[in-house]
Amino acid sequence: MYALAGKRVWVAGDRGLVGSALMRRLASEDCELLASPRENVDLRSSEQTESWVREARPHAVFVAAARVGGIHANNTRPAEFLYDNLMIAANVVEAARRHQVEKLMFLGSTCIYPRLAPQPIPESALLTGPLEPTNEWYAVAKIAGIKLCQAYRQQYGCDFISAMPTNLYGPGDNFDMTQGHVVPALIAKAHRARVKREKSLVVWGTGRPRREFLFVDDAADALVHLMKAYSSPEIVNLGTGSEVTIAELVEKVCRVVGFDGTVLYDASKPDGTPRKVTDVSRLAAMGWRAKVGLEEGLERAYAWYRAHPTLALEAMLERA
Ligand code: GDP
């Protein structure tokens, strides 16, 4: 067991979806929370990362900082998704080693698995086949991060671990209709359609892909659980083990938001990987399971969105 009590804990990426959920979750642990100021610590810079870690001296680190986005962002900004994520992973891991960080948790993603991996996807599927092309740049950077943790454990004895969260959503998400992931993008689109009394809502792809969704506060709870109880080079999936089609998700989002118009599918937009649901038996064996179901999670995400009127206003002003 690794005790967080009395420790300085740095959440790299504290303002992002996962980082802000980690800050909420860690507030109930008896530890000192550290957040690097975004204005003068760019984690893509090795000098800035190194000097922050040297000054702040964290005992434990969660690497939740990343260049992230939905299928369109990933597909159209390959250089940023590869470069930014490679640099963040390499800089944080190396600075953590130099300054004797006791424990580090690196966050990957289930898009690291091959496009046609067996379903539910076991952790052993890593590097067994070609990646999904719409997110391979992000995936390659995240695979490099996992390998850094394994290499630093092997060569230097660092207690660095990695977890692979499935598609996350919740408070603090990016609700941009073009750059965001499917859940926040659909919430924003359905909200706008309802408020503007539009007759239809356009969904990307065929509606047939299957995805698994984990509420971000559940993910943060699992990450803290692993930080305390897990120490191994083996990666761990973070998910619910259950899946829905995009069409089923759309139905649920429309119900939560109160949009009852027509749903149109734009098959000229990519579907991405056909199916993605994780095998969560490794996490379950450690006594952890998700608590927030999809309907409840969508309601909480929508409530957060509505409580941030500037986001909703931006969606109103954005052209379809
Ligand atoms: P992925 O899980 O890596 O493919 O990432 P996303 O969350 O961006 O997309 C999941 C699925 O939702 C894909 O099949 C998309 O085509 C589909 N989708 C449908 N409508 C939207 C939308 O408005 N935004 C996004 N990002 N995806 C959408």
Image: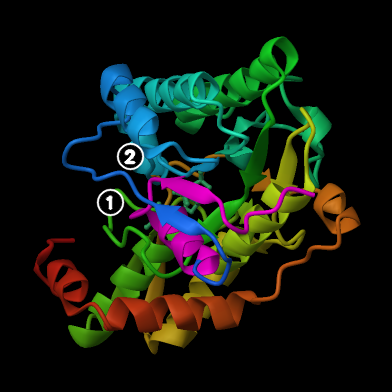
Q: Which label belongs to residue 17?
A: none
| Label 2 beta carbon within 8 A of ligand 1 | yes
Q: Is residue 279 magenta?
A: no
For badge 2, the amino acid type reads Ala
Residue 50 on image: x %, y %: 35, 23
Q: Earlier in the sequence, mark 2 or mark 1?
A: 2
At label 1, counting other C-alpha atoms closer than 10 Å, the crowd grade (few under 14, some 14-19, many 20 or more) is some
* Residue at the image position 61 percent from the left and 74 percent from the top: 294
Establish whether ligand 1 lies closer than 8 Å to the Cβ of label 1: yes
Above or below, comparing residue 81 to residue 276 in the picture: above
Residue drawn at (90%, 55%) of the image: 285
- Quadrant of res 162: top right
Q: Would you name the residue on which mark 1 appears?
A: 178
Q: Position of residue 150 (x, y in %)?
A: 69, 21
Give the CA separation, mark 2 to mark 1: 7 Å
The quadrant holding residue 174 is bottom left
| Horizontal side of residue 290 vs 93, given as left or right | right
**Residue placed farthest to the left in the image?**
317
Seen from the viewer's position, the closer of residues 20 and 227 is 227
Q: Which residues are magenta?
A: 1-26
Three-letter code, disc 1: Thr
Is residue 7 in the magenta section? yes
